[in-house]
Amino acid sequence: MSEVDVAIVGGGVAGLAAAVTLAEQGLKVVVLESRSILGGRARSWVDGVTRDPVHIGPHVVVSEYPNFFKLLEKLQTLEKIVWQPWRHFVTFVQGKVDYHIRTRPLPAPASWGPASIFDPFVTWADKHSTVPAAVHCLGLDEEELMKLDGQSGAEFLRGLGVTEDYIRHFWGFLSHAILNVPVEEVSAAALVRFFRRLVGRSSMEMGFSGCGLGELLVPAKPFLEKLGSTVRTSTEVRGFLGSERCEGVVLDSGEEIRPKLGVISSLPPQTFLPLVPVAWEGAGFRSLEALKPCKYISVYLWFDRKVTEGMQMWARTYSKDDLNCEFYDFSEIYPGKDAQGQPWKERPSFVGSNIIDSGRLADMTDEEIVQGTLREMQERFPKALEAKVLHSVVNRIPMAIHRPVVGTESLRPDQATEVPGLYLAGCWTRTEFPSSMESAARSGFLAADALLRGQGRQSQAAIAYGPISLSARLVGKLDVLRPMLLAPLFRGLVRLSGAPKSKL
Ligand SMILES: Cc1cc2nc3c(=O)[nH]c(=O)nc-3n(C[C@H](O)[C@H](O)[C@H](O)COP(=O)(O)OP(=O)(O)OC[C@H]3O[C@@H](n4cnc5c(N)ncnc54)[C@H](O)[C@@H]3O)c2cc1C
């Protein structure tokens, strides 16, 4: 192929964010993607039976996704995001009971206060017990956060006096749903960082793709081609070239691509490592073996009638014995009409759900997964008992994100590597955000910035995260009062609220 400036390995969110940035800077890039479609772990396709768009697994976005939205804005697909009602964060479901987590128009963290105070699934003692911990978390900066990487979320919270029930209910849910590992295993640094971002803002809204997820990203191809760059799908990279520096990549076909300025790899760690030449052994990549994949099973059920009472999305309160974490009814989410011209809102329920960290369920058959998912739906929605499932799909996904267990936050590498000419992108690299589409987009922008700076050019594509709100920072300052005042006061309140001694 004709000469290129930069080769980008992988056409997921990270690779495309890097490619778009560099192409806009006038560089000629080639994106090399092994699959026949773009999107990577955010890809989608049309279901062969129903002709409906199906994501690899249901995804959410939150209002704090500045880098991902910047990418979508460039690709002119940002308007395809569908938002839940203003200030609605999530609906918890336990048995037949719903609880809507909504923020109030107050400064953070008070805006989240009423939702926590009236939470029906935990006791007053549990709620009191978490206040000193919340204040402590809001008072930490990034450097202090990273020092927590050596302990688990549960250990950290116990040390601050949070009851076991509250650790399981609130922190356990956050850990499972966002970071995808149990709170007993999660790095306290990763958990606390996300908590600060959530509660440090007056509000955080959740939204969904209003079309197949990959459709948000596929306009990257014409975008790049218009700027003189190339996207090659069904093109697998078999290895990196060079010993002192990264000189390029070799493809499955044997073709070598030697770009003028460098290579950006956006491969996940376990795909990247086998391709690393022996000569780069000293570059510190081996530690990335500790970033293990978190498996998912995503389930899609097409019903013969409406069963979800108009709900777009809900999450089960956390229990380690459950199958699914969250559910989505796409007939209530997708705007407009389906491929047959029928308005989505008039369609029977088309429900997707995610089973997170699904390695524990490897022995279950697809039919058992479908029946188990149906049972979990029927607990809340009696109509699902009478309804027929017309069609189902079970996607077994080897990696949704890496497992952010104790010690792994410090292992997330910078985008510039010790190998000249090689840059890393991918949701798992260092972005100060949990692995997600936002982290992937930011990593791609950071990798492009690093490459351009290496060429002596100014570049600031990645959007930095601002500090949490002033009011939340002021609450964090109260942490100085914690040892002498807050902790004893709330311990007293926990006792007065009648918590069993074992929970203190
Ligand atoms: C079921 C599921 C649910 C999720 N839910 C959410 C959510 O709600 N919100 C959220 O923000 N994130 C969610 N995520 C995570 C999110 O999808 C990922 O963090 C993000 O898409 C990762 O993007 P990436 O570009 O870093 O990596 P990838 O998307 O993995 O990109 C790497 C690309 O490299 C390609 N590739 C691999 N090997 C080669 C090779 N040898 N040669 C060439 N190309 C190769 C792959 O095909 C892939 O396209 C979810 C993921 C899954 C799977």
Image (spheres, grey):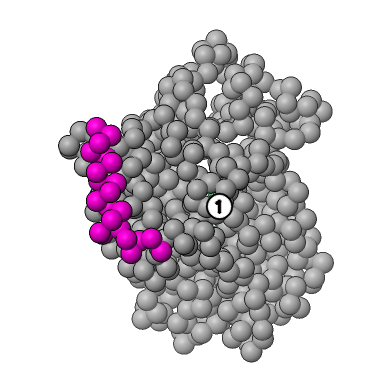
| Amino acid type of the residue that numbered disc 1 sits on in the rendered structure | Pro
Q: Is residue 193 magenta?
A: no
Marker count (numbered): 1
Residue 50 occupies which quadrant of the picture? top right
- Is most of the magenta stretch helix, strand or loop? helix
Front in this rendered view, residue 279 or 329: 329
Q: Which percent across, then down, holds residue 229?
A: 75, 70
Side (left or right) of 290 relative to 412: left
Q: Residue at x 43, y 26 (%)?
A: 94
Does residue 329 show up?
A: yes
Residue situated in front as seen by the camera: 271 or 195 = 195
Visible in this render: residue 435?
no
In this view, 263 is above or below 224: below
When the figure is inspected, residue 345 is found, relative to residue 63, above or below; the finding is: above
Residue most toward the left?
501
Where residue 444 appears, x then y in whole percent?
59, 67
Quadrant of the picture in which ligand 1 is shown: bottom right
Q: Is residue 411 left or right of residue 48?
A: left
The secondary element bearing badge 1 is classed as loop
In this view, the residue in front, 284 or 250, is 284
The percent coordinates of residue 125 (x first, y second) are: 30, 37
Magenta residue span: 477-498
Image quadrant in which the C terminus is located: top left
Taking the magenta stretch, the answer to whether it contains residue 482 is yes
Which residue carries the number 1 mark?
A: 107
